[in-house]
Structure formats: structure tokens, C-alpha cells
Image: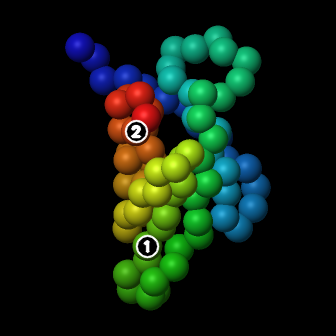
Amino acid sequence: MTTPRYGNRRADCDTYLEFIWRLPSDAPNPQAIAYITGAYGTPRKPWFCGVYGIHVVEGPTVADVKAELFALLDAGQ
């Protein structure tokens, strides 16, 4: 089984919305929209939070948060 791939793009704002779709796709709309906060915590230890539906995921980088969001999509959440 191959690992699913996702495309995404970011809206331009301090915190942002991540529009997510599984690749390859010719779907006209994203499969999910996630809200990701800007960094909070301390400058030496930033922390990010992502919200998708009723799920909240956290991590030290935006990439970590997005990986957890993609895992929720893969699990059909």
C-alpha cells in the first residue's frame, strides 16, 4: 500500500487556514479545511495547534501539526 499524498495551500493571515486535498485529484474543492494557529509558547520552544472538525492536534512545528491532520484524514476521521 502506498502512502497517500496531499496537496494544500495556505490562506494569507497570521493564523491560517490550510486547504487540504489528497493527491492525485481533480476535485474542484478541498477535502478538508484545517485552522492552524501561529506559534505560541516561548521563543525557544514554539508550539502550534491545528483544528480539524472536532479534533485538535498540537506539535512543535507546523509540519508536525499537518502530519497529524493528514493522519486523521487517512483514518477517516
Q: Which mark is in front, 1 or 2?
A: 2
Q: Residue at x 38, y 47 (%)?
A: 68
Q: Which residue is mark 1?
A: 47
Looking at this view, name the residue that lies furthest to the front.
54
**Residue 75: image x %, image y %?**
35, 31
Label 1: how many Cα within 10 Å (few below 14, some 14–19, many 20+): some
> Which residue shows up at 54% across the image and 54% down it?
51
Left or right? Give the position of 42 relative to 27: left
- Give the distance between the C-alpha atoms of the residues marked 1 and 2, in whole angstroms: 19 Å
State whether residue 77 is above or below residue 59.
above
Q: What's the residue type where badge 2 is placed? A: Leu
For residue 38, side relative to residue 43 (left or right): right
Instruction: Tell me if mark 2 has few (under 14), some (14-19) or many (20+) residues whose alpha carbon lies within 10 angstroms of its own.
Output: some
* Rendered view: 67 above or below 23: below
Task: Name the mark on residue 56.
Answer: none
Pointers 1 and 2 in contact (CB under 8 A)? no
Residue that badge 2 annotates: 72
The x and y percentages for residue 69 are 44, 44
Say which label, 1 or 2, has the lower sequence index. 1
Residue sitting at x 73%, y 50%: 11
User: Exactly how many numbered labels are in the figure?
Assistant: 2
For the residue marked with disc 1, what is the amino acid? Answer: Trp
Indicate whether 45 appears above or below 22: below
Is residue 27 positioned above or below 71 on the image? Answer: above
